[in-house]
Image (spheres, grey):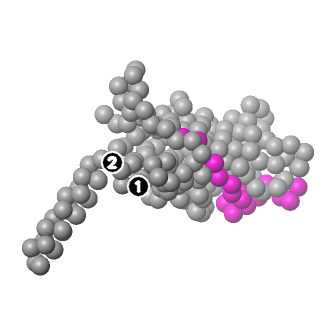
Amino acid sequence: MKRTALTTALITTLLAAAGLASATTYNIDPSHTYPSFEADHKGMSLWRGKFNSSKGTITLDRAAKTGSLDIEIDINSIDFGHDGMNGHAKKADIFDAEKFPTATYKSKSFRFEGDRLVGVDGELTLHGVTKPVQLKVDRFKCEQNARLKREVCGANATADFNRADFGITFGLPAFAPEVKLAIQVEAIATE
């Protein structure tokens, strides 16, 4: 009986070690990653913006169906396609980019359906406030890149959150506080 328990423990340890060995770390490709959002403009239209600069890492173990990510977004890279709005959004009454120059999203919880990544449970830190935000992943694919000679993974993720929960209250109640977030991301396996 002791021998069976010892053998089982040894096999479990070896399998766990093998699972760790299959985890791959990927660096976010900033030229293919653009967190974007849409927010209400007085009920008349939706303003859409994106952030042109982000960086971070993703660790993914598809066999174990686990992962983690750590993403940093440069608030000063905000781009509405309108210079006046870009400048205003960075001021203290909206993002306060001088005081809070980055936003982050961190997670150690990935959700899979079969072999497909479908969600990420993590925490968004925006405007100095950290709150849980769930990402829904509606597109996910990894493949060997012929030019880079490394694996590249890409995804499209979405989420909804209330900006007032993060202390961004400009224009309320004339401007609704709900924000739709969309993230196109590609990441390259480290060498």
User: Which quarter of the rendered picture does the C terminus lie within?
Assistant: top left
Write the residue at 47% across / 52% down: 114
Q: Please give left or right for residue 30 compared with residue 188 in the image.
A: right
Amino acid of disc 2: Ala
Circle 2 residue: 23
User: Which quarter of the rendered picture does the N terminus lie within?
Assistant: bottom left
Q: Nearer the viewer, residue 133 or 97?
A: 133
For residue 45, which quarter of the picture? top right
Write the residue at 36% across / 43% down: 25
Circle 1 residue: 66
Q: Nearer the viewer, residue 13 or 33?
A: 13
> Is residue 167 highlighted in magenta?
yes
Q: Which residue is situated farthest in the top direction here?
A: 147
Q: Which residues are magenta?
A: 155-174
For residue 44, which quarter of the picture? top right
Do the residues bearing badges 2 and 1 touch, measured as CB atoms within 8 Å? yes
Q: Position of residue 73 (x, y in %)?
A: 56, 44
